Image (spheres, rainbow, N blue to C red):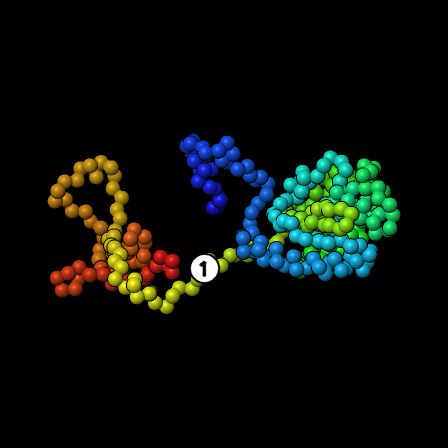
Amino acid sequence: MKPDLSQAEVDALLGEEVRTEDAVAPRDFRRPHRLGATQLASLTKMISSCLPAIERSLATQSGSDLELSLCQIDETTREAFLSSLDEDGFFVQAYDLNGETGWVHWDPRDVRLAVERSLGCGSSSQSSAPLSDLERSLAGGFTIPIAAGVASEIDCSVTAGESYVDKRLLQASIDAAPAGDNQRLSITLDVTCEAFTSKVHIYLPGVTPVEDTSAQGEAPASLPGHFDEVEVLVSAELAGLELPLQEFLDLEEGDVIALGSGDEMTARLVVDGRPAGTATWGREGDRIALRIKDLLIESND
């Protein structure tokens, strides 16, 4: 794990002087972070590029003039999604996505305004009355095409599901879900038209992380010329031996420590303090010499 802590946060955690009162940023540990910056940037481009087609689809189906823009992409869980909802006054459209359940969360007042606007009715969006069955059904004509268009960018197909209006029922559906990986992708869209501005929150099943190889480059065929004269310290550790503490304390000058026969002995190569391979040892003339057995030097060493 490589937490993205700033120096101020480290100092605060270690009890050092804190420069500001909010040096340690709060973190929601229910929100895992498995997608790298490169993958999130790719998802951002993919989803942003599909929004104009969704706008045209909505205009054809319902005559709406809604404009969509991507606000945020984040990672979340089923439980975090549920805790983000108000106790009452919310609208959630469920949908089936490749055998899993996803949700669209939209403020009910904006849902009512969008429905009334598409029907050419007068606005009553300030009403706090619960949405009627007809309003919830008509709202699906907006939420499902939006969710389906976004999900198609990650190769998933969407079909309409139940419109939940009771948090207790929504909790029950989440509790009954398979107890596997509950990773979710949270996508927030800005929805605007002449009459209002709103946000629609889409919760998709988790996207599989991919390894970020953007920082991994191929090893050069040879070093640049200016590295030719750089010196590194190469040493060979002949063997290691464990001794009882008392035997170690009893050692005197001239004592002989048996390490093993020559056929068994290999030396461990160390380059600037890092393991770099092994070698067998012997003599070349009157000098002790090493024959390289294997090298473990990585490309970034």
Residue 35 image offset from top left, x and y in percent: 56, 52
Instruction: Name the outermost residue toward the front.
Output: 194
On the picture, is 180 further left or further right than 227?
Answer: right
Q: In this view, does 101 lie above or below 50?
A: above
Residue 242 image offset from top left, x and y in percent: 27, 44
Residue that numbered label 1 is attached to: 216
On the picture, is 72 further left or further right than 236?
Answer: right
Q: Can residue 202 be seen in this view?
A: no
Write the residue at 42% across / 64% down: 218
Write the residue at 44% across / 40% down: 7
Q: Is residue 4 visible?
A: yes
Residue 139 image offset from top left, x and y in percent: 80, 49
Q: Is residue 56 above or below residue 167?
A: below
Residue closest to the eye, 260 or 214: 214
Write the residue at 87% across / 50% down: 120
On the picture, is 285 further left or further right than 180?
Answer: left
Q: What element carries label 1?
A: loop
Q: Quadrant of the C terminus?
A: bottom left
